[in-house]
Amino acid sequence: MGTTKNMQFLRTSNRAAIIKALALGEASNRVELSSHLGLSKMAISGLINDLVADGYVEDRKYSPFRDSTWYTGDASGRKPSALSIVPRRINAIGILLKRYEVHCMIAEIQGNILYHDFCPLPMDADNVSLSEILVSLVEKALHSHGDCFIAGIGIASIGPLDITQKRILYPPNFCSIGNLYIGELLEERFRLPVYLDNDMNASAIAEQFYGVGKTADTLAYVGFGSGVGAGIIIHGKLLHGSAGFAGEIGHISINPQGPQCSCGQKGCIETYTSVSRLLDDMGADSVTNLRQMIQDDKLDERRQKRLKECRYALKTLLITIANLYDPEVIIFGEIPPTLAPVYLDEMETYMNTNMFHHGFQNIRLYPSSFGENAPLIGSASLIFKGIFDGKIPLPDRIAK
């Protein structure tokens, strides 16, 4: 029995590794898979044959339009076939919970969005009304793509969250919503696995799989909104901490005499860089309006001082991330309204000049590949990560 279980575990793990390599473009044929995964060609061929028979992978003949240096072939001159995930074969539903909106989408495992819808969240929303909205959005998504295989439902949400019990705790300023076992609700209703994580962690996974973080083993994703948070990936693994609250970098105090923060401290990075707070302090009604004010250089002395404080806090934030986590890249979820794209280069130079290990590493600073859609793409990526990790096994012989 033990041997049988071990064999099944290895098969599931190897299938998952092949699916990941093909879906993320890490390999495209048997030879590359064998080298990338460290499996024999015979083992790879057997697994690929099963995945083709089960309807997940398509085996295409070598294309004469590819560069002739792509592969030299074997002794007989034959070219290896090119492999890929069957389009629209492996999909997930992604849900993004924002303070005043709920988004729902379907994405395929290659990262392409097939469907997207959203619903405003009423100011007086509670657990019951949010549950009704979620069920309605998921039902609508499933109805619109009834022919798609759905592997699970991923939820990216503002926090704090209990990701182990798939529960929304009591996020600040989140209507009357709290202590909602959202995973249990959707799993019972739709009989699909449900994964829950905060929006910053989900965004980091999206960048790791499909964005500018694809080549990085260690990265940090930083998001700005009503607060500031980060998703940290170290050696390919998401950092959750002991209870799932890692990445709350906005609550690092940089000025004990600074503004009062919602966490109880004073002078937290969030009090200087929070977009909503910044708009209020600068007298702007939107991010676009604030960027225009900065571009026109028509800020009075008070606003210039506030802008300088924000930029100093951002620099301190970058230095802190660099010193704590030593990432290869840091990704800004959206370029903060106080930064023009050209200013990112200045920030990157400042960070690499002033971090503790300056001169030994050059950390790159990038804007997100997906802008404000990063957490939405990340929500479905939670399910794809479950597939890649072998925690969500794909059923045999799904209908083609």
Image (cartoon, helix red, strand yellow):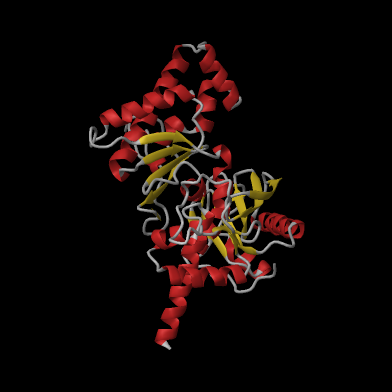
Q: Is residue 7 above or below residue 367?
A: below
Residue 221 pos. (x, y %): 44, 42
The residue shown at (68%, 56%) is 134
Q: Is residue 328 above or below residue 197?
A: above
Q: Which quadrant: the C terminus?
A: bottom right
Q: Is residue 205 visible?
A: yes
Is 217 positioned to the left or the right of 172 in the image?
left
Q: Is residue 339 visible?
A: no
Residue 257 pos. (x, y %): 33, 30
Is 67 positioned to the left or the right of 94 in the image?
left
Q: Is residue 380 above or below residue 335?
A: below
The residue shown at (31%, 39%) is 322
The residue shown at (48%, 72%) is 12
Is 218 positioned to the left or the right of 68 in the image?
left
Number of numbered discs overlaid on the protein picture: 0
Q: Which quadrant: the N terminus?
A: bottom left
Residue 362 pos. (x, y %): 30, 35
Among all residues in the image, which is located at the extreme bottom? Answer: 1
Among all residues in the image, which is located at the extreme front? Answer: 76
